[in-house]
Image (cartoon, rainbow, N blue to C red):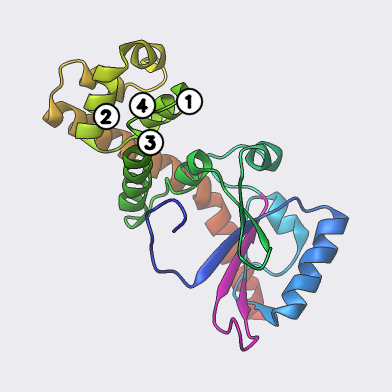
Amino acid sequence: MFYGAAEFSRDCDIVFVADDDNLTRLSAALAQLEAECIAIPPFDPQFWERGHAIHFRCQHPDVKGIRLDVMTKMRGCDPFEQLWERRMTLEDTDGMIYEILGIEDLVKAKKTQRDKDWPMVQRLIDAHYDTFRDNPTDEQVCFWLRESRTPEVLIAVASAYPNQRDQLLSIRPVLQATLSASRTAVKQSLREEELLERSADESYWQPLKDELQALRSRRARK
């Protein structure tokens, strides 16, 4: 919502460092929210270390029904320390501080095998481009070249900033298609890129899904 690509959701994703102090803070926050661990895996730090998210459902009247997905790592994203350095800090009118993923890290986190996430990735980047296109920083231009999923936007940015485009050609093959300014070619290259990301996400999660299934089977036998 903050980045201009709102999607109705009743869950909240939380990434944190699973040290003793944070686990104590997390347990206290969960107790205040009257949050119950739901489904599999159970509330056990060993599962965070292996890449799982642990899921909670809030029961406090003010937040009843909201799900919390708590994790220490995300597929395709940097370690927490780097995410923290790039975070966006918000403060509401009551002085409450919120730390949210930076826009680039949010985009990376949304590159999953789920159909609903790819339109969101596109909207996030398009909204960022619309906001900063008139006077962008070099960092913003490179972000659009690395991540844009709208053919017209990618072609326009690549044409306007050829030096940055050429620097990134080796790390994003899609940019090669912008040289011809062909919307069809860029669209096809973007689709191929998306399929590779979906496949990578599926490969990452498959062993974790197998582990969850084994946990469910053991629980069912008890």
Badge number at residue 132: 3
Q: Which residue is mark 4?
A: 145
Distance between mark 3 and mark 1 Cα atoms: 11 Å
Q: Give the quarter of the image for residue 80.
A: top right
Q: Which residue is mark 1?
A: 139
Distance between mark 1 and mark 4 Cα atoms: 10 Å
Front one among 125 and 112: 125
Q: Is residue 46 above or below residue 183?
A: below
Distance between mark 4 and mark 2 Cα atoms: 6 Å
Residue at horizontal 39 percent and vertical 26 percent from the top = 141
Which amino acid is tagged 2?
Answer: Leu
Which amino acid is tagged 3?
Answer: Phe
Which amino acid is tagged 1?
Answer: Glu
Asked whether the residues under the numbered discs 4 and 2 touch, taking CB atoms below 8 Å apart as contact, a structural biologist would say yes
Residue range of the region highlighted in magenta in the rendering: 56-72
The answer to whether 33 appears left or right of 168 in the picture is: right
Residue neighbourhood size for the residue with mark 3, other residues' Cα within 10 Å, grouped as few (<14), some (14–19), many (≥20): few
Mark 3 or mark 2: name the one nearer the start of the chain: 3
Front one among 116 and 133: 133
State the quadrant of the C terminus: bottom right
Mark 3 or mark 4: name the one nearer the start of the chain: 3
Query: Judging from the image, what secondary structure is the residue with disc 3 in?
Result: helix
Q: Which residue is mark 2?
A: 154
Residue at horizontal 40 percent and vertical 17 percent from the top = 168
